[in-house]
Image (tube, rainbow, N blue to C red):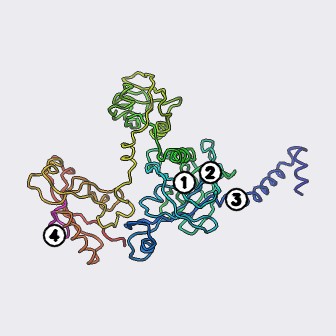
Amino acid sequence: MRTWRIVMIVLGTACVTHTAGLADELVQITRPVMIAKLLPAIVNITSYVGTAASPSDNAVAAATTAGGRGKTMDGSGFIVDPTGYIATNYHVVEGAYRIVVMFSDGETADAKLVGSVRMGDIAVLRVNVGSPLTAVKWGDSDRLQLGDSVFAVGNPLGLGLSVSAGIVSALNRNIMETPYDHFIQTDAAINHGNSGGPLFNMQGEVIGMGTAFISPTNSSAGLGFAIPSSGVRFVVDRIEKYGWLRPAWLGVKVEQVTPELADAIGMAKPQGDIIAKVFDNSPASAAGFQVGDVIVQFGDQMQPNEPALLRDIVRAPIGENVKVVLWRNGQTKESAIKVAEWPRNLWDTLNAPETTDPVVERVSPDLGLSLGPLTKDARASYQLGADQEGVLITRVAANTDAAHRGLSAGDVILRLQQEAVASSADMRAALDKARAQQHKFVAMLVLQPASTPPALPTPRWLAVRIASD
C-alpha cells in the first residue's frame, strides 16, 4: 500500500489525504530512530552544593545524607563539542563544589566548570572521558515560527532522561529572568530538572535550552521557556574560545522608553532606550553620547526593546565601528561608535555570583539579611541619630520572607525575641535559640527610617519566618 500511495501522488490532488497519511507514517517511523540517535548527546547533571572544602567522597556522602552539610541539585545538559564541552544553565551548577554528569548509557564523569554567564543563565562544563563524544547539531532559532513542533529532553524531577513534545507557543517572551530575555515559550513539558536540557526541532537540531517554567503549582502547566539557540551558541563559542564571554561594551546604562517617558521628553511615540549613565573613558563618552539621549537604532536594525539592544551590544564586533541613531532634543542624529571589549574587572564584578541563594534564604540561618554595625558613617549615611543603637541591615536578598515582610537596607533591628541586639553575633544567638525552641517565626522590633519621611521613624514589630514548615 505504501508503494501504491507513492505512485498515486503524481496523478492529482485527489490523493492528498493518502500523501498526508504517508507523511504521518514516515514521521512515526523516523522520530523514535532520530531521538534514539540524539540521546547520547544529552546528560543528567548532579551538582553538590554546600560547605565542603573540597570535592572529597566524604563530603559528597555528607551532602546526600539527612543532616549533611549541603544538598544536591538535579539538572540537564547537552554535549556541544566531541572533546567534552557541555552546555547547561548557570543555576544548575551555581555554588557547586562538585559536578557529576551521567550519560545516556549510565556512565558518569566529573565535570569542570569552564565558564558561565550568570546574567544569561548559561554555563559551560567540560568532561574528559578519553574518547570523542556525540555532540548535538545546532539549529537556527531565528527561523522558528509559532506552531512549529518541538520536543524537549531532560531529567525532570531527577527521574532520568525523558522526552516531551509540543509546539512553539510564543517567541521573544520577556519573563524578567535576565536582562537579555527573549525566551521561546513552549507547551512541551518542562519541570524541575529539565533546566539546561535541549529543545529540539523536528530535524533533531537544538533550537533552545530549557530554562524555566511558570506554574501555580510545582510542576509544568504548559508554560515552559527556553533560551534560543542563537544566544546559547554565542555564549558557548565565546567561552570555548576565550574562557569567558568577552562581550562588547559601549559604556552606557539604558532604560526602555515607556509611553510615560516618551510624553515627558517630547517623543511622538515610545521607541528606543534612554541613556541613564555614560561611563567615563568609555566608547560612548568618546562618541559624545549624553545622559538623556535615546538610542533608537544600533547597527542596521531598530531594537524593539531594552533586552534586544543589550543583546546586540554584547554581540557587536569588538574594535569595529557600529552605526548608532540617537534622538536628542527632538532631533535624530546618526553617528558611529567604536565598540570596545567589556573591561574584564567590571564584567567579573557584574557577573559574580550573588551572595545569597534566593531559594534557600527563605529559611536560611541568616534569613537572607546582610548585617553591619552602626558606625558613625553608617548612621550618617542612613540619616540615623548619633546615639542610635541596634544592628543595621545592609542588604535583603530577593524572594526571602524578610523581603516580603518589608525589610530593606537601612532598617535597624532593635530587638529580636524581646532581646536587645547590638551585633551580628547577638542576632545569630537569638536565632539559634528560637530554632532550638522550635519556633516557626521570630519577632523583630525594627526601625525603618526610609519608610517614614518626613515624620520621625517609629519602631514596628515584624514576624519573620525561620522554619520551612
Residue appearing at x 51%, y 31% in the figure: 302
User: Is 151 positioned to the left or the right of 453 in the image?
Assistant: right
- Read off the residue under disc 2: 206
Instruction: Look at label 2 and name its amino acid.
Output: Val
Residue type highlighted by circle 3: Lys
Residue to which mark 1 is pinned:
87
Q: Please state which of the two labelled residues, at mark 1 or mark 2, is closer to the viewer.
A: 1
Say if mark 1 contacts mark 2, CB within 8 Å: no
Distance between mark 4 and mark 2 Cα atoms: 57 Å
Q: Residue at x 49, y 53 (%)?
A: 114
Question: Which SS class for mark 1?
Answer: strand
Asked if the residue at tag 2 contacts the one at tag 4, i.e. Cβ–Cβ closer than 8 Å, the answer is no
Q: Quote the CA–CA distance across marks 2 and 3.
A: 13 Å
Of mark 2 and mark 3, the one earlier in the sequence is 3
Range of magenta residues: 412-422
Mark 3 vs mark 1: which is more N-terminal?
3
Q: Is residue 209 magenta?
A: no
Percent x, y for residue 264? 34, 31
Mark 3 and mark 4: Cα distance apart in space: 64 Å
Q: Is residue 382 visible?
A: yes
Residue 37 numbered tag: 3
Q: Considering the numbered disc 2 on the image, is that residue within a helix, a strand or a loop?
A: strand
